[in-house]
Image (cartoon, rainbow, N blue to C red):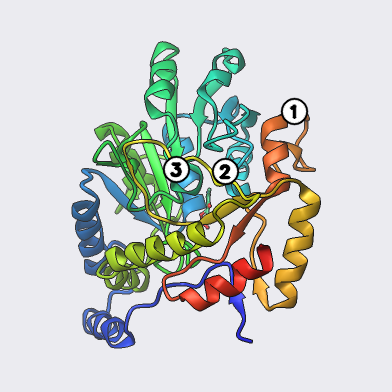
Amino acid sequence: MSRINVTKSFLPPIEEYEAYLKKIWDSGQLTNQGPLLKEFEDHTKKYLGLERFHFVTNGTLALQLALKAVGVNGGEVITTPFSYVATTSAILWENATPVYADIDPETLNLDPQNIEELITPETKAILPVHVFGNPCDVEEIEKIAKKHSIKVIYDAAHAFGVTYKKKSLLSWGDISVCSFHATKLFQTIEGGCVVVNDDNITSDIELMKRFGHRWNDHQMLGINAKASEFQAAMGLCSLNYIDDVIAKRKQISSVYDGELKDTQYKKPKIREETEYNYSYYPVIFRDEESLLQAKKKLEKENIFPRRYFYPSLNTLPYLENKQSCPVSEGVAKKILSLPLYSDLNTEEVKRITEVLC
Ligand SMILES: *Cc1c(COP(=O)(O)O)cnc(C)c1O
């Protein structure tokens, strides 16, 4: 029986990538804001309806740049415990302390009701995640952030192609960052972006991502977050197929929905007025024990789901002070992401759900 992993990268027809390789060979420019990078940024901005968009090496560096750009250098950042580890490690890497606001059990996103009691004079930013591409309560978060004059950075790593109230989900917050890693819905091999809602921040990000200088004019501290022409080429090819990819994932998700109807499995509640991207298919089990049993049975059938997200980040062993987030810790133990990618077929979905039911 063929192996089924939790995800599989969408690859465009190889001829289309080769045509771009030819262009790279002709231009001789491999990186450093080349023509394909500019083309990719233009096309993606247009596709998502965004004004300011910086293509960078990966989603983690996008987070580092965003934190730096809003002045995080030490201090505290209020964030969610239910995410991939990069959300927390980016904060720690900037010498700041993550302060965890527990999540809403229905949406699995940071619950805005938990934010205000955590704000101190040391709070430098709020970093929520649109978990699995499901929009946070962006209006409520914005209200709290405005009231206390704190910047909001969204980790929108899963949110490519999602619209909320008819606008790209990446347009919310002072800054949003996305990941285009090979395992994500939309891939540029490695890659990510920073989307900014402020002209001053945009010019800082553009400088910081290339060592902080233009020729011999060193204006600020920078780092290397430049994406190459090869990554831009993959992005240009992938972008042509993203609508099909999302449509196929939607269809596969509805097969899962049908097969798992009236069973123990619960799904996160997608926010209203959302055009979803079907980036993941997570299911919440009754308890951890039934999850572990099911995972073992699936693995015997050559099916490899992933425990996204586990463990809850407030329990990471290298954190200095332990904080308690009972909702997130509970969900993290019971949630499993089932395989979902555009060429997963109906028979394969049934192979998976038969083991589960
Ligand atoms: C994947 C991911 C990241 C990191 O993105 P990379 O491109 O892999 O560096 C950050 N946050 C979340 C929530 C992610 O899923």
Horizontal placement of 288 versus 50: left or right? right
Q: How many neighbours does mark 2 have within 10 angstroms: few (below 14), some (14-19), or many (20 or more)? A: many
Q: Earlier in the sequence, mark 3 or mark 2?
A: 2
Give the quarter of the figure containing the N terminus: bottom right
Residue 218 appearing in the image = no
Q: Residue at x 57, y 30 (%)?
A: 104
* Amino acid type at mark 2: Thr
Sequence-first disc among 2 and 1: 2
The C terminus lies in quadrant: bottom right
Q: Residue at x 46, y 76 (%)?
A: 345
- Mark 2 vs ligand 1: CB under 8 Å? yes
The mark found on residue 355 in the picture is none
User: What residue sits right under mark 3 in the picture?
Assistant: 134
Q: CA distance from mark 2 to mark 1?
A: 18 Å
**Identity, as a three-letter code, of the amino acid under mark 1:** Ser
Report whether 354 appears left or right of 206.
right
Q: Is mark 3 within 8 Å of ligand 1?
A: no
Measure the C-alpha gap from mark 3 to mark 1: 24 Å
Q: Secondary structure at mark 3?
A: loop
User: Which is in the foreground here, disc 3 or disc 1?
Assistant: 3
Counting every numbered tag in the picture gives 3
Of tags 3 and 2, the one toward the viewer is 3
Q: Which residue is mark 1?
A: 324
**Residue at the (36%, 35%) spot, across then down:** 272
Tag nearer the camera, 2 or 1:
1
Q: Label 2 belongs to which residue?
A: 87
Residue 4 spot, x, y in % from top left: 59, 76
Q: Are marks 2 and 1 in contact (CB under 8 Å)?
A: no
Relative to 65, does residue 294 appear above or below in the rendering?
Answer: below
Quadrant location of residue 238? bottom left
- Horizontal and vertical percent for residue 112? 51, 23
